[in-house]
Structure formats: structure tokens, C-alpha cells
């Protein structure tokens, strides 16, 4: 049975998609069977995995509205080594259509049941908002991985996200919990970043991953080549950090 994790943060531009794609690729390189679910209508995780969102016949949209199953909609042939349930602009209209559907917050959960035995990890890249799409991700996940920058505004957004997770846990998904906080785009020369990092460790303790992902140009360049940063430049500091993060995740799930 797969471990299902959302990569979520209500603040935009904090590295959710970069984390989703590179964690998926790193886990696959370490022998794990991985499905990456793109729940963002922008389809960045899809493109970053080397899948052309403009050429899709089926996507996560069809899965959510009941027109297709995951086995038909997923892309299994990727150079990144993991499977992708892709997204494109069709997904933007899914929320409106899902409002009138039964179990609208559990559509993804129900769909994933047919494939969870085929994977070790299912990673869900959530959009940067508390939408019905994000809610679908949270309702089927065992836990949430929160990538965040070490800056003041990120702390503000974190408190909102923690409250959201508590509400979903209480009302919709008793299995949901925070797996950990991943510090990304970290600049050790920045005094504020060091102070916020220390505050996170003080407040959340072992919920903060040991891995710290540095700010890295090669990670930013990789999506334009249609591949994860860990494949684009394996020696880059960011790529090395995500490989360490994958190993840390593999160890952490052993204790679940």
C-alpha cells in the first residue's frame, strides 16, 4: 500500500512543484515506485516531469469528474522514472463541475484506490490556495509535506495552513497529519533566514526535516528542459539536497 503525501502550502512561489518533481525523481532513483499527481491547473509539475500538457488526451480532470480512471489517464513512460497523473487548463473548470457531484471532497481518494497497491509513494502537488482541489488532496493523504522559505511572510502562511490541516483532520480525514517542514531556497548568508530556521526547529522540533535545500539556479533552469533538477544536473547543490531528502523520507516512513 502506498504512502500518500500532499506537498502543500497556501503561499505561492515557495517551491511546492520543485519539491514534488525532485522528490518524485529522487525516490524513483532510490528504487521506489512513485506516482506524482498534479492537482494544479497550471500543470507545472506535468511539464517539469517531461510530459507535454498540451498534447494530453486524458488528465486528472477526467478522473475527478468521473470520465476516466487513473489507469487510463496516467502517463507511465517518463524519462524521470516515475508515473504522472497529469494536469492542464481543463482542471481550472473542475471545481465548478465538482460542486454538484456526490462526495466532491473525496473524488481523488476514491479514484486512487484502484492503483495504490502499485506504488510505494503517491505525491500530490497541490495548488497555492485552499480550494476544492487542495481539499481533495488533503482528504486522501496520510500526511502533508510543507516546503517553505525561511522568511517572515512564510511563517504567517504556515499558521493558516496548520489550522487548515487541523480542520481537515477533525472533519474529513483522521489519518492526516503534518509529516514535516522542508526548508527550501535557503541562503545561509541571510541572518533572517537563519533566525526563522531556528524558530521552526524550536517550535516544531523533529517535524522539521534535517535536509535544507539551498537556493540553486540549476534547479530553476531544469523545468525549461522538461526534467527534474536531480536529473538535469546531478552534481548541483540543490539536486544533492533533494537526494538526501528522499533518503530521509524513506527512513521516516518506516516509523509510520
Image (tube, rainbow, N blue to C red):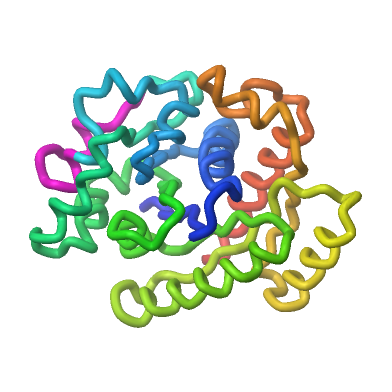
Q: Position of residue 91 (x, y in %)?
A: 26, 41
Along the horizontal axis of the image, is 63 left or right of 162?
left
Residue located 22% across and 61% down the image: 106
Residue 239 placement, left or right of 23: right
Asked which quadrant contains residue 42, the reply is top left
Residue situated in front as seen by the camera: 136 or 96? 96
| Residue found 65% across the figure and 64% down from its top | 153
Using the image, determine if residue 128 lies above or below residue 204: above
Whether residue 65 sits left or right of residue 15 in the image: it is: left
Residue at image coords 20%, 23% = 57
Question: Is 70 included in the stretch rendered in magenta?
Answer: yes
> Is residue 238 within the magenta segment?
no
Give the answer, above or below, for where 198 lies relative to 245.
below
Image quarter of residue 236: top right
In the picture, measured across the screen, residue 131 lies left or right of residue 239, that is left
x and y percent of residue 25 in the render?
Answer: 55, 33
Farthest residue toward the bottom? 170
Residue 189 spot, x, y in % from top left: 91, 50
The magenta region covers 62-76
Q: How many marks?
A: 0
The answer to whether residue 110 is above or below residue 201 is above
Q: Position of residue 181 (x, y in %)?
A: 63, 61
Residue drawn 77% across the image and 76% down it: 202
Amino acid at each position: 500500500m502506498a504512502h500518500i503525501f500532499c506537498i502543500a502550502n497556501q503561499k505561492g512561489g515557495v517551491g511546492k512543484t520543485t519539491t514534488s518533481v525532485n522528490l518524485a525523481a529522487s525516490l524513483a532513483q532510490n528504487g521506489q515506485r512513485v506516482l506524482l499527481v498534479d492537482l494544479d491547473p497550471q500543470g507545472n509539475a506535468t511539464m517539469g516531469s517531461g510530459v507535454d500538457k498540451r498534447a494530453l488526451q486524458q488528465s486528472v480532470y477526467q478522473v475527478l469528474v468521473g470520465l476516466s480512471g487513473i489507469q487510463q489517464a496516467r502517463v507511465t513512460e517518463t524519462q524521470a522514472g516515475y508515473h504522472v497523473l497529469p494536469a492542464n487548463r481543463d482542471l481550472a473548470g473542475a471545481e465548478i463541475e465538482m460542486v454538484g457531484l456526490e462526495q466532491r471532497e473525496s473524488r481523488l481518494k476514491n479514484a486512487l484506490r484502484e492503483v495504490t497497491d502499485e506504488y510505494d509513494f503517491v505525491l500530490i502537488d497541490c495548488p497555492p490556495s485552499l480550494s476544492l482541489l487542495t481539499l481533495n488532496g488533503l482528504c486522501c493523504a496520510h500526511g502533508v509535506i510543507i516546503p517553505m522559505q525561511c522568511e517572515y511572510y512564510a511563517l504567517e502562511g504556515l499558521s493558516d495552513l496548520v489550522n487548515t490541516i487541523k480542520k481537515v483532520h477533525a472533519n474529513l480525514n483522521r489519518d492526516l497529519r503534518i509529516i514535516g517542514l522542508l526548508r527550501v531556497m535557503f541562503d545561509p548568508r541571510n541572518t533572517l533566514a537563519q533566525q526563522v530556521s531556528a524558530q521552526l526547529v524550536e517550535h516544531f522540533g523533529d517535524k522539521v526535516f534535517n535536509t535544507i535545500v539551498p537556493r540553486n539556479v540549476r534547479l530553476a533552469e531544469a523545468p525549461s528542459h522538461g526534467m527534474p533538477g536531480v536529473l538535469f544536473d546531478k552534481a548541483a547543490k540543490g539536486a544533492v539536497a533533494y537526494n538526501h531528502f528522499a533518503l530521509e523520507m524513506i527512513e521516516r516512513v518506516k516509523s509510520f
